Amino acid sequence: MSNERKIIEINSAVLGKNDEIANENRRAFQQQRLLVLNLLSSPGSGKTTLLERTLKELGAKYHIGVIVGDLATERDAERLKKEGKNVAAITTGRTCHLDASMVRAAYHRLSLEGLSLLFIENVGNLICPASFDLGEDSRIVLLSVTEGEDKPLKYPVIFRLADLVIITKIDIAPALGCNLNELNANIRQVAPGADIISLSARSGEGFTQWLSYLGHRLVHK
Ligand code: MG
Ligand code: ZN
C-alpha cells in the first residue's frame, strides 16, 4: 500500500470514530434541548472577545455554557470565567482541533441544569477543525478585517460548512483600508447559503444583530 493511501485510510477510520461520538453528543444535546454552536476561526480573529461580550449581555437571561479549546494555556477560559461560571477548558497539547470525544468529556464537566446555549470555541485553525463534527447544531466561522479580503477564497472548505460567518473588528476596518464589500462578496462566493453578520465586540457596532440571531435560534430550538 502506498503511504498516501495508508494515510487516507487511517484518516477515514479516525473520522468515522469521531462521527460516531459526535452523533452521541448530538443526541445528548437534543435531549437537553440545548443549542450548540461551534466557533471556528484563525488564531486572533476574536472568538474569545465575542464570547466575553455575549456572556456579559445574555448571561442574565440564559444559562450559557462554554467549552474552550486551546493548544496550550487556559488563558481564554480564565477570561471567560470572569463573565460566566460555566466554562470548561480543553488543552489539546499538539492537536490543532477539537474532536467529539474531547467535547464529550468537557460537556460532562459543565453544570447542565437549565443550560440552553452551549458555545464551543474551537482551536484557532482554519483547516482541520472543519473535518471534525462535534455534534453541534451549527458552525460559525469568524473572520477579522485584519486577515485580508481573500481569506475565504484561500480556505473555502471551512467557509462552505458555515451557517453563519461573522466579520469581526469592523471598528478598525477604515484604518486598515479593508474593503468590506469585497470581503462580503468573497464570503458569498464560497458560502452562498451562509448568513453574514459584521460587528465589533469592542465598539458594539453590529452586536445587536448577533444577539438577535442567537435569540431567534434559541426560540426555534
Ligand atoms: Mg480564543
Ligand atoms: Zn487538527
Image (cartoon, grey):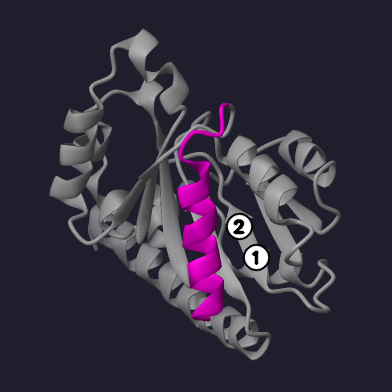
150 lies left or right of 55: left
Figure quadrant of residue 155: top left
Residue lying at 37% horizontally and 55% vertically, measured from the top left: 164
Q: Nearer the viewer, residue 200 or 26?
A: 200
Indicate yes or no whether the magenta region holds residue 128: no
Residue range corresponding to the magenta coloring: 203-221
In depth, the one of 148 and 11 nearer the eye is 148
Instruction: Name the residue that disc number 1 marks.
Output: 118
Q: Residues within 10 Å of mark 2 (few under 14, many from 20)?
A: many
Task: Judge whether 66 appears above or below 94 on screen.
Answer: below
Pick whichever, 42 or 204, lies toward us.
204
Q: Disc 1 marks which amino acid?
A: Leu
Read off the residue under disc 2: 120
- State the separation of the CA atoms marked 1 and 2: 7 Å
Classed neighbour count for the residue bearing mark 1: other residues with Cα under 10 Å, few (<14), some (14–19), many (≥20): many
Q: Is residue 41 left or right of residue 9?
A: right
Quarter holding residue 35: bottom right
In the image, what residue occupies the spot 49% across and 69% down? 216
Please provide percent x and percent y for residue 21. 56, 79
In percent of width and height, residue 147 lies at 36, 24
Secondary structure of the residue carrying numbered label 1:
strand
Q: Are marks 1 and 2 in contact (CB under 8 Å)?
A: yes
x, y (%) of residue 86? Answer: 82, 59
Q: Which mark is residue 146?
A: none
